[in-house]
Image (cartoon, rainbow, N blue to C red):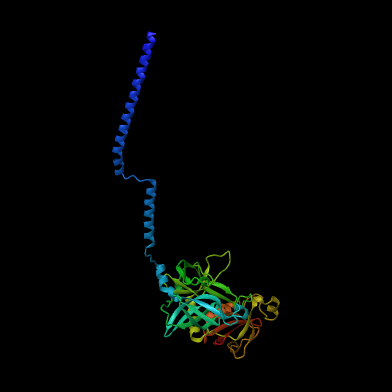
Amino acid sequence: MGYYDQDHQNSYKGQKGNKGGYFLASLVGVILGAILVVVAVPMLSDYNVLQPDEKLQDEAANNNNANVQKVSLDVETDVTKAVDKAGDAVVSITNIQTAGFWSNEGNGNGGGQPAGTGSGVIYKKEGNTAFIVTNHHVVEGAQELEVSLQDGTKLPARLVGSDIWTDLAVLEVEAKEIKTVAEFGNSDTLKPGEPVIAIGNPLGQFSGSVTQGIISGLERAIPIDIDQNGTVDWQAEVLQTDAAINPGNSGGALVNISGQLIGINSMKIAESAVEGIGLAIPINYARPVIEDLEKFGEVKRPYMGVQLASVNEIPGYYQQEALKLPKDVKTGVAITSVEPNSPASQARLKEMDVIVEMDGKEIKDIIELRQHLYTKKSVGDQMKIKFYRDGKLKEATMKLTGETF
């Protein structure tokens, strides 16, 4: 019993002592932790440690500042200078035609309706009149014409003259509101790869649109069906560019990097498989046409006074029996009729003669004959002709007059 009582007492005393030690250790830990917090917080504040959200906010603010600086830059390049120089000389043209009864939407009145829109270029200002060049197909069939300047001013226009073969036309308007006139460049000095800019009114609603590209090709020959009868009547020599030229751009300006007019935008090859092919009439080719239209209202072209047919369209039997051509002659232009007192008549050409050469140039068909006559010769010129008659090669000299072909 005595042993048991003593152990029990010692055990009780040990447990009591342990509780006092735990309390003391905890108290010391709390005090040390408080001291560390008091010391560490000021030190952390000196390092200016940011929370993740605060970092993102600072980065966003910096980005916003950078964007504001980029937008406010004053960008000026050779392209913008060229557009500033030529842009205001490009106008929109509205073709107004008389509408039928059912086109009046029940208003019971006659009147004009816009039949189409295109573009034009102011190329000359003389006294109270300003002159505008555009495409023939832009103004074809118009009863009225209206020109819209870049600032929105609308002016009535008068057709001075139009030419279906070159697809060019000249209009005139009052010059009071005209401030900018295009400067002619030199299309003969253009090189493939040279940068160019197209300015116009695509789709009839995006006035003053600008597209940039390069000269893709020079002296491209494009077949043209003048009469819309499925037969090629003419080959237009045009510039090829990859600057976008869409419907409504026709008649607009193609300018070089100096802002000079080097082409009149014309048709665009509208095939789903073809992209980046725009066409323009070279300004050096257009200028004499423009001058004739302005002075005479038409182009003064040389006149032969004949009706023609291409030999390659005549059956072989008639080539031998009627025309009596040698077997090795497969091309040329046959005369089907000669007008009295015409240049052809005075040169003693006759029906059934077959023209094979003009001024030393081989003539294979009607298109080549027209190209030589219309682009190489002028009214009053002499033209040497080689032709077959009854199987024999002959020569004649023709003096060209200015009647209508």
Residue 261 in sight here = yes
Q: Nearer the viewer, residue 159 or 338?
A: 159
Q: Quadrant of residue 355?
A: bottom right
For the view shown, which residue lies furthest in the bottom direction? 341
The vertical placement of 34 against 339, above or below, is above
- On the image, the x and y values in percent for residue 380 come to 52, 87
- On the image, the x and y values in percent for residue 168 come to 52, 79
Determine the residue positioned at 38% across, 60% down: 68
Q: Nearer the viewer, residue 316 or 44?
A: 44
In the shown orientation, is residue 203 left or right of residue 329?
left
Quadrant placement of the C terminus? bottom right
Quadrant placement of the N terminus? top left
- On the image, the x and y values in percent for residue 198 come to 47, 70
Q: Nearer the viewer, residue 160 or 43?
A: 43
Residue 239 in sight here = no
- On the image, the x and y values in percent for residue 127 come to 42, 85
Give the mark count. 0
In the shown orientation, is residue 244 left or right of residue 22?
right
